[in-house]
Amino acid sequence: MVTEVSSSARVAVLGLGEAGSEIARDLATAGADVRGYDPVAGAPAGVAARRDERDAVRDADLVLSVNSSHDALPALEAALDALRPGTVWADLNTASPGVKQQLAERLAGRDVPVADVALMAPVPGKGLRTPMVVSGPGAQRYARLLSGWGASVDVLDGPPGAAISRKLLRSVFYKGLAAAVVEALEGARAAGVEDWLRENVADELAGFDRSTLVRLVEGTHTHARRRTDEMAAAAEQLRELGVEPRVATAAHDLLAELRDRSAAR
């Protein structure tokens, strides 16, 4: 990838919490001219503190919005009138594709291209080295600048929302799996078999490969009727143990829907 490094490139970071502060600090260390704003947190070493969003973005070539999903739009609104034409607005928040598209719509006609940035791993400990996927009209310039400062950025061909869509779809699996493990272990603890289940889960995960995915998907559809009954029993057991079966109930409901679809054919 061709990199674009400019000592005159100025970066504004909005949101200096756990993720934003590490990214801002790494950018400053890499030689970027960084200014930042956060209503609560102070600016890390090497980052010039600004008094609000407007003040932070007024002379920036690149803006990184690293707030939260519900702050993505308010952060843009607070900075909007101070954005200069040509500035790239990069949204690093884990917001929905719809929110990313709203950002682009709000900036339409202002010559401020949007880069939808999906952070594909936890930022703490990685900072600027966190793998990123980016889409939208500002994606190429974002990638050139950030790569020049040492970041790992993959450009995805697509509009704002395309990059975050991949992260969120993956989150359904990763976070859903984590929630299922937590609920199962809570039940196992109440039943006095937590150590056994921990070993069992670890062994199962260690054996996962591509064929496992095929078996999971095909088996779920083929055996939806039997598994619906099994998850009803599993949920009832958790209730008997004093554990609310949120994940087990959701699994039961999905299996029941698949069962009913198959029966209707």
Image (tube, helix red, strand yellow):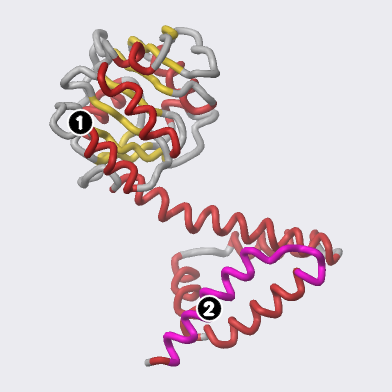
Q: Is residue 200 above or below residue 83?
A: below
- Left or right placement of residue 67 versus residue 18 in this view: left
* Residue carrying label 1: 113
Residue 49, above or below 169? above
Residue 113 picture quarter: top left
Q: Which residues are magenta?
A: 239-263
Q: Whole-percent x and y of residue 40?
A: 54, 18
Q: Counting residues from the N terminus, which is met first, the one under dot 1 or under dot 2?
A: 1
Q: Please give the residue where the numbered disc 2 appears in the rendered image.
A: 255
Tell me which secondary structure the magenta stretch mostly adopts.
helix
Residue in the picture at 60% in, 55% down: 178
Residue 194 lies, in percent from the top left, at 80, 60
How far apart are the alpha carbons under marks 1 and 2?
Answer: 43 Å
Instruction: Please name the amino acid that badge 2 sits on.
Output: Leu
**Residue beneath the point at 33% across and 10% down:** 33
Residue 16 falls within the magenta-colored stretch = no
For this rendering, which residue is in front, 100 or 8?
A: 100
